[in-house]
Image: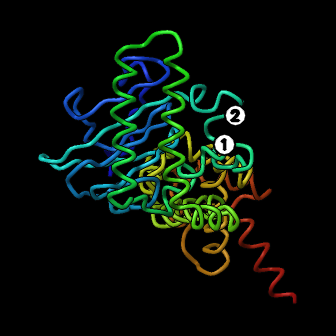
Amino acid sequence: MSSLSRVPTYGMQQRSDREDFYIRDKQDREALTSPHRHEYFQIQINLGGDTVQHIGGAVRPFPRNALSFILPHRLHLIPHPEQGNFMLINVAQGFLLPHLACDPLDLEDVPLAQAPELAPFQFQEHLDFILDDGAFAEIETVLQRLRTLDRTRDFGTTTLLRAGLLHVIGVVSQHFAEPLQQLASDKATHRGRRDALARVTAYIREHIADPQLTLKEAAAAAFLSPNYLTHLLRKDTGSTFSELVLERRMRLARTHLLNSDEPISHIAQRCGFADEAYFSRRFRQTQGLPPGQFRRQQRGHSAHQ
């Protein structure tokens, strides 16, 4: 899991020959074999070789005839079989959504009425976009045209590339219209965020005694990128990761102080503080009293009631 705490973020210039749109197959560049994220949209198309995809907190099947739609900054991995075949499209946000000015980390919240192109990207963690042979053959035809256009760019090519890209998204959206619309109606992206935060909260609870508990490790455990987790916490709780961990540690400290006779030093260790003096200082800052006085005062109140 520690390797996930250092997942790289790639820009278009690192993984693409162009800054706006790039399409390739496995012969053009080796696939990434460890969890990663990138600043651009990506579509992967499985032309042969069953595998799975890890995206956000989900692990979903990724067989032949499947497409994967990956939002910017979404941690993911698709391990391609050695004999498998795939095609991949990288596309900048301004190319796909020229009409939309939006922080990439907020793309999940954009209403589909405003940007229907986002539908498969928003709900990839909830659906498997596997097409029948007829629909997939249509996709393959478009992909070959896109490859030809991308190699021989001239005036008008950019418009045709975007039209082809929208064709691919449109075919998938049309075939999965009902579940996509249902997911949008159910606000599935919000549910996905809640599930992600629940995984992070569980990790914090399990590792609360570890003084080395960090944002990177908690994000990795939930298969999120650190910057995405930071964004989620600010949006959903208004707190930073450090504030959330401290609040949980203080809550646990109060419980031990009120319900046990353990020495302060032991409670400090249970709550993730290697130094008793630092624990006492932080407890006083947040609770208004040092831990020993808090314990005496609260027990005194209980005795008088």
Secondary structure beneath disc 1? helix
Judge left or right: residue 180 versus residue 157: right
For the residue labelled by badge 2, is the local secondary structure a helix, a strand or a loop?
A: loop
Within 10 Å of the Cα at label 2, are there few (<14), some (14-19), or many (20+) other Cα atoms? Answer: few
Q: Which residue is mark 2?
A: 102
**Residue, x 26% and y 42% (percent of image)?**
86
**Residue in the picture at 76% in, 80% down:** 299
202 vs 103: above or below:
below
Give the residue at x 56% y 47%: 229
Q: Evaluate if marks 2 and 1 touch, with contact meaning CB atoms under 8 Å apart.
A: yes
Instruction: Compare residues 262 and 110 and report the one nearer the observer.
Output: 110
Horizontally, is 83 left or right of 157 in the view? left
Q: Is residue 24 above or below residue 216?
A: above
Residue at label 1? 106
**Relative to residue 209, is residue 259 depicted above or below?**
below
Q: Amino acid at mark 1?
A: Asp
Amino acid beneath label 2: Cys
Q: Is residue 211 left or right of residue 27?
A: right
Judging depth in this view, the residue of 16 and 180 nearest the camera is 180
